[in-house]
Amino acid sequence: MSIVDWSVLVLTLTGIVAYGIVRSRGSRSMDDYLLAGQSLPWYHVGLSVMATQASAITFLSAPGQGFTDGMRFVQFYFGLPLAMVVLSITFVPIFHRLKIFTAYEFLEDRFDTRVRTLTAGLFLLQRGLSTGLSIYAPAIILSTILGWNIYWTNLLMGGIVLLYTVTGGTKAISYTHLQQMAVVTFAMGLAGYLTVKMLPEGVGFVDALHVAGEAGRMNLIDLKFDPESRYNLWSGLIGGFFLQLSYFGTDQSQVGRYLTGQSIGQSRLGLLMNGLLKVPMQFLILLVGVLVFVFYQFNPAPTFFNKQETESLKNSRYASQYQLAEIKHQNLTTQRQRAVLDMQAALQTDDEAGQTAAGTILRETDEALKVVKTDVTKLIRQNNPAADTNDVNYIFLRFVLDYLPHGLIGLLIAVIFSASMGSIASAYNSLASTTVVDVYKRLINKAGSDADYLNASRWATIGWGIFCIAVAQFANQLGSMIEAVNILGSLFYGVILGVFVVAFYVKSIGGRATFWAAIISEVLVVISWILNLTAFLWLNAIGCLLVVSIAWVLQRTVFRDR
Amino acid sequence: MTENNTGLPSFIRSWNQLYAIVMGSLAVEIILFYLLMRWLS
């Protein structure tokens, strides 16, 4: 990074943080600090919800996903607009009318203190650990590519957020979300535009889309119902709907965002804005990745984008094998470039036979290049079993550093920081509000003044910030912990969703049945994970289903008269 | 269910209409994506 990039990065981040702090001065009550006094208009709510969901990995990994796997990942978000409608009809009015701070408060109103405390506890455990990894995941990529120290990167990533979250609370988070979304949209749009501009003369945007289509990257819709396939129309609509409903309906980091709306109407409008914009936004981010893919059809692409690993391979006993793979890769790249130029000529002359022939070569070389990449990945793993071989996360950043102009590089690094800060800030805030409202105020200091709770909220934010940064530092030494915490999330999320499903939709079931159903379900979910009965992603659905069915049975048998 | 229409933009008559717009937009996007895919492959 040049001095220009550093200046842009520092100025952008300082500007965002300063603006957030200045605009949020004067939080004098817990209501102000945790819910922004329920004073925010719909566009604040909508942008805040979007900034919370879009983490740094979204902007690092999604273009990489578009590059390697095409546009089909967009289907994953098809359930989101439907979930926003259901939330607007059911969750939002109930949460607003009860004037609650956290989603778990509602559970006491509906059931009892035990269910509320259990669910809040499960949330704190899961969110605390996963926020640590939200800090670590982009920090490790930035530190690998830019040569930064991982500990300092973690500290910077988690520390800046702590600064304005502690001082300004929810208002600061919301105001910074606005700036962050503006920076992200502008920089990603500019990156996409420049990628097209850098294509060879005579190759325009539509030509680029044709090349991408021929290479199988414009695979937007898969109508086939196949449970084995991760992304198709049906898994996106059905699976995506349940996933988004549980995330936006029961995760305090999101509930806390739309509870800041001035009224039920403003919160609803914010969520529906997210429902309207999320799919197009994800489409455009993936398209940037597809355009980068097209760019590399005309320019030499590295065998592996994580340079640190290939450099280490060059100096290992696998160097000769790597060299052979490199030669193979270069030959295939030349072959592919020729096919793309043929395709370009055939498109301009409307030569259908020429297009088909070039398309076939393009797809064949693409497959052969994938095989070479798999071979290199194997070599990297043999050389260093702890190596980060998930190259998808490195593609976009490598492209940015190698080809985009100075200034924009700094801005795009600021995008990664901004996106990361947006989701981490909401997480800190949700952890603090759940700790103070559901634990401290409810169980430890019931008769405190508003000033006590405001003070406690600030200390809880600091405490959770330190905890999450510590988890990020620890994750650096335990690579396998990322998967462990993902599994941990799946172990708890389904059970939490199950409790809320019972609360909203099965009015005949009471608190005791739900509490014991949640405990039994949690044990069963953990057992099915230990016995490896299913892939861990399915544990979400299983946990939810178990809570509902066990609570129903318990209510009709053991707790019939209660 | 969605009886209170306060807070809506002036050009929208009811919440149900807005919900229909959100779901309709999704349907239009899916159709457009499908057509784009067919055109480019």
Image (spheres, coloured by chain):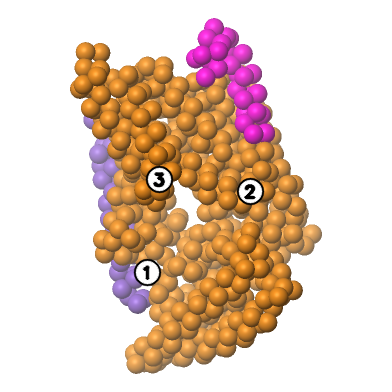
**Which tint is chain A?**
orange
* Majority secondary structure of magenta residues: helix
Q: Which chain is purple?
A: B
Q: Chain of mark 2?
A: A
**Under tag 1, what secondary structure?**
loop
As drawn, is A26 to the left or to the right of A47?
right
Q: Which residues are magenta?
A: A439-467
Circle 2 crowding by C-alpha within 10 Å: few under 14, some 14–19, many from 20: few
Q: Nearer the viewer, mark 3 or mark 1?
A: 3
Circle 1 crowding by C-alpha within 10 Å: few under 14, some 14–19, many from 20: many
Q: Chain of mark 3?
A: A
Task: Tell me the residue at 29%/38% (across/down).
Answer: A545
Sooner in the amino-acid sequence: mark 2 or mark 3: 2
Q: Nearer the viewer, mark 1 or mark 2?
A: 2
For the residues labelled 2 and 3, the Cα–Cα distance comes to 23 Å
Say if the magenta span includes residue A281. Answer: no
| Identity of the residue furthest to the top in this view | A447
Residue where numbered disc 3 is placed: A531
Please provide percent x and percent y for residue A310.
67, 71
Sooner in the amino-acid sequence: mark 1 or mark 2: 1
Residue where numbered disc 1 is placed: A219
Checking the image for residue A473, the label placed there is: none
Task: Tell me the residue at 63%/40% (across/down).
Answer: A471
**Under tag 2, what secondary structure?**
loop
Q: Nearer the viewer, mark 2 or mark 3?
A: 3
Q: Chain of mark 1?
A: A
Q: Answer yes or no: do the residues labelled 3 and 1 have beta carbons within 8 Å? A: no
The C terminus of chain A lies in quadrant: top left
Residue where numbered disc 2 is placed: A478
Where is A547 relative to B22, above or below?
A: above
